[in-house]
Image (cartoon, rainbow, N blue to C red):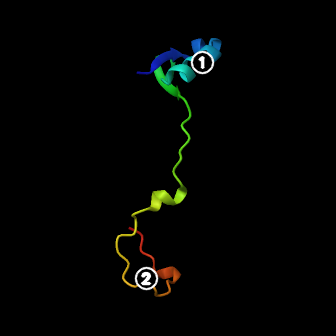
Amino acid sequence: MSQRVSKSKFKAQALEFFRLIESSGESVVITDHGVPKFEVRTFLLQTKKPLDVQYGSVLHFDYPTNPVAENDWEIA
């Protein structure tokens, strides 16, 4: 569960909050007059390769050996 803190308190104790976020892994929500405005959390490096996102997106291809022209593409 994330902790909520005002902007002024976060500004005064930013390094403490950074250490807390780093050690616990929980996020901190920064509020402005009680309204959530920002969320500070640890950075998670994505290990997916860019082409992995496209994996499985071609469902059917009638003639895989024929050349493909620019106007042959359909956008779903």
Say which amino acid is labelled 2. Answer: Pro
Q: Earlier in the sequence, mark 2 or mark 1?
A: 1
Say which amino acid is labelled 1. Answer: Arg
Quarter placement of the C terminus: bottom left
- Of residues 23 and 28, which is closer to you in this image? 23
Q: Residue at x 60, y 18 (%)?
A: 19
Q: Secondary structure at mark 2?
A: loop
In the rendered structure, are the residues bearing label 2 and label 1 in contact, judged by CB atoms less than 8 Å apart? no
Q: Secondary structure at mark 1?
A: helix
Name the disc covering residue 74, or none: none
Spatial separation of the CA atoms under disc 2 and disc 1: 54 Å
Name the disc covering residue 19, or none: 1
Residue 60: x and y, percent? 35, 75
Camera sees residue 39:
yes
- Of residues 6 and 49, which is closer to you in this image? 49
Q: Which residue is mark 2?
A: 64
Q: Residue at x 38, y 78 (%)?
A: 61
Q: Residue at x 63, y 17 (%)?
A: 14
Question: Pointer 2: residues within 10 angstroms few (<14), some, or many (20+)?
Answer: few
Q: Residue at x 44, y 21 (%)?
A: 2
Camera sees residue 33:
no
Residue 12: x and y, percent? 64, 11
Where, by quadrant of the figure, is residue 58 drawn?
bottom left
* Vertical placement of residue 70 versus 42, above or below: below
